[in-house]
Image (cartoon, rainbow, N blue to C red):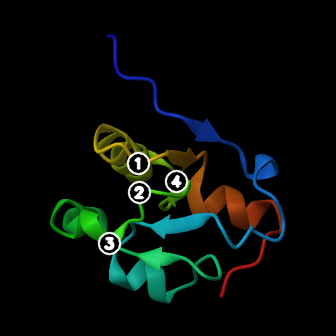
Amino acid sequence: MDEISIPTVEVAGVPDPVPAELVVLDVREDDEWASGHIDGAVHIPLGDLAARADEVPADRQVLVYCHAGGRSARATGFLQQRGVDAVNLAGGVIAWHQAGRRLV
């Protein structure tokens, strides 16, 4: 099964603190967002992304995450097709939290 390769980064590959020029995009649902998210993240649920794609800056790198990495991989592929420099966060917010990174 040949699929388009989705650019992915491990939590350890994301600078701490997250650089201001990096857009962090959370594609989880509202209740997941409310339970804790990466500080400074933009929240656009995956189901809304196609309609709200213009809200994602195309001139900066975008780190996309969800709960475990599946939805964000789909979102990353979608954004890549639109010319956005998007990267999927491997393991999502689970991996972020397990690595001891802060959620708000």
Q: Which mark is residue 23?
A: none
Residue at image location 21% in from the left, 69% down from the top: 48
Q: Nearer the viewer, mark 2 or mark 3?
A: 2
Q: Earlier in the sequence, mark 4 or mark 1?
A: 4
- Kindly identify the amino acid type of the residue bearing the numbered disc 2: Ala
Element under disc 4: loop
65 or 25, which lies in front? 25
Q: Report the Cα–Cα distance between label 2 and label 1.
A: 5 Å
Q: Residues within 10 Å of mark 4 (few under 14, many from 20)?
A: some
Residue at mark 4 to residue at mark 1: CA–CA distance? 22 Å
For disc 2, the marked residue is 58
> Dot 1 lies on which element?
loop
Total marks drawn? 4
Image quadrant where residue 57 sits: bottom left
Could you tell which of marks 2 and 1 lies nearer the N-terminus?
Answer: 2
Label 2 SS: loop
Tell me if mark 2 has few (under 14), some (14-19) or many (20+) residues whose alpha carbon lies within 10 angstroms of its own.
some
Q: Is residue 73 above or below residue 47?
A: above
Q: Are marks 4 and 1 in contact (CB under 8 Å)?
A: no
Marks 4, 3: nearer the viewer: 3
